[in-house]
Image (cartoon, rainbow, N blue to C red):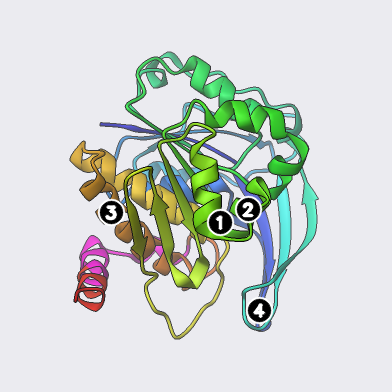
Amino acid sequence: MGILVVGTVTLDTVETPSERVEDVLGGSGVYAAVAASFFRRDIQLVGVIGADFPDPYTDFLETQGIDLRGLKRVDNGKSFRWGGRYTQDFNVRDTLFTELNVIEDFQPVLPETYKDTPYLFLANNSPVLQLSIIEQATNPKLIVCDTMDFWINEERAALEALLARVDILVLNDSEALLLTGDSNLMQAAQAILRYGPKRVIIKKGEHGAISVTESSFFTAPAYPLTQVTDPTGAGDSFAGGMMGYLASIGDTSEEAIRSAMVYGAVVASFNIEDFSINRQKDVQFSEISSRYRELQEASHF
């Protein structure tokens, strides 16, 4: 069963205490689609790029089995660019610049062949845009969306309308607290459920992620790493890996989602080991399976 990923496709500049890279492939849609491609080869990516977007980047995405018919190239436009700088502990990131360019006026129209795709991941984006995708989808089996503090603050009404239409909301711990005004994550998760989603998954970075429904609680560990190079896109990789696994088995049960979260954590761990999607280019599925088994063993008691 295929996966439709709607998100940003960007050129990123990233600074860490030891290195700086410019105009590398990034974006929420890219990280999620590449992560999902480890499990499925029928990923559809919707986004927008400018005339300056390098062909080798789109060529790579196609080699991963990612369908780019939904990726619009604006011939007289410039691609979305973002720059960020990490501190020594990588838990703090400063945004250096954001150049929206072609995404500022982007109103995606799904190709006909995309509309009945059963698994839909709405990567971080405007909730108005995310709602428009739901309106165009004709056969969703599972709708998962991500959001961030900007949309919580600036498009609150649209976000609340969106939450009534999705099955799973994915966000990080600070965003969950911001959305609800709570100071306790469990209280925040329960408050978010009242907006409409059936499940809330809260990402906690190096401390893993928790899943909360009205009747269940689960915590997925993060894979322990001794060396972090670039955490950009790790959350999107987590969600993309989770979606890829669920689509590969055609199951959205509690048990399946718990396994999917651990697979997502594993895929995200590879993302962190290099800039952009450089590490993912070399990852073999046997490595993903090996780390999954390690996390199984580490969390068994």
What percent of the width, then of the height, locates residue 76?
76, 29
Q: Amino acid at mark 2?
A: Glu
Amino acid at the residue labelled 1: Asn
Q: Are marks 2 and 1 in contact (CB under 8 Å)?
A: yes
Q: Are marks 1 and 4 in contact (CB under 8 Å)?
A: no
What secondary structure characterizes most of the magenta part? helix
Q: Is residue 92 visible?
A: yes
Q: Which residue is mark 3?
A: 258
Please report the residue visible at 54 percent of the width from the left and 42 percent of the height from the top: 192
> On the rendered image, what quadrant is the N terminus found in?
top left
Q: Which residues are magenta?
A: 278-292
- Whether 28 is among the magenta residues is no
The C terminus sits in image quarter? bottom left
Measured Cα–Cα span from mark 1 to mark 4: 26 Å
Badge 1: residue crowd in 10 Å (few <14, some 14–19, many ≥20): some
Q: Amino acid at mark 4?
A: Glu
For disc 2, the marked residue is 175
For the residues labelled 4 and 2, say whether their Cβ atoms are less than 8 Å apart.
no
**Marks 2/1: CA distance?**
5 Å
Q: In the rendered image of this protein, does residue 67 appear above or below residue 181?
A: above
Q: Position of residue 101 (x, y in %)?
A: 77, 38
The answer to whether 182 appears left or right of 100 in the picture is left
Real-space Cα separation, disc 3 to disc 2, in angstroms: 22 Å
Q: Secondary structure at mark 3?
A: helix
Q: Residues within 10 Å of mark 2 (few under 14, many from 20)?
A: many
Residue at position x 57%, y 24% from top? 131
Q: Is residue 56 in view?
A: no
What label does residue 172 carry, if any?
A: 1
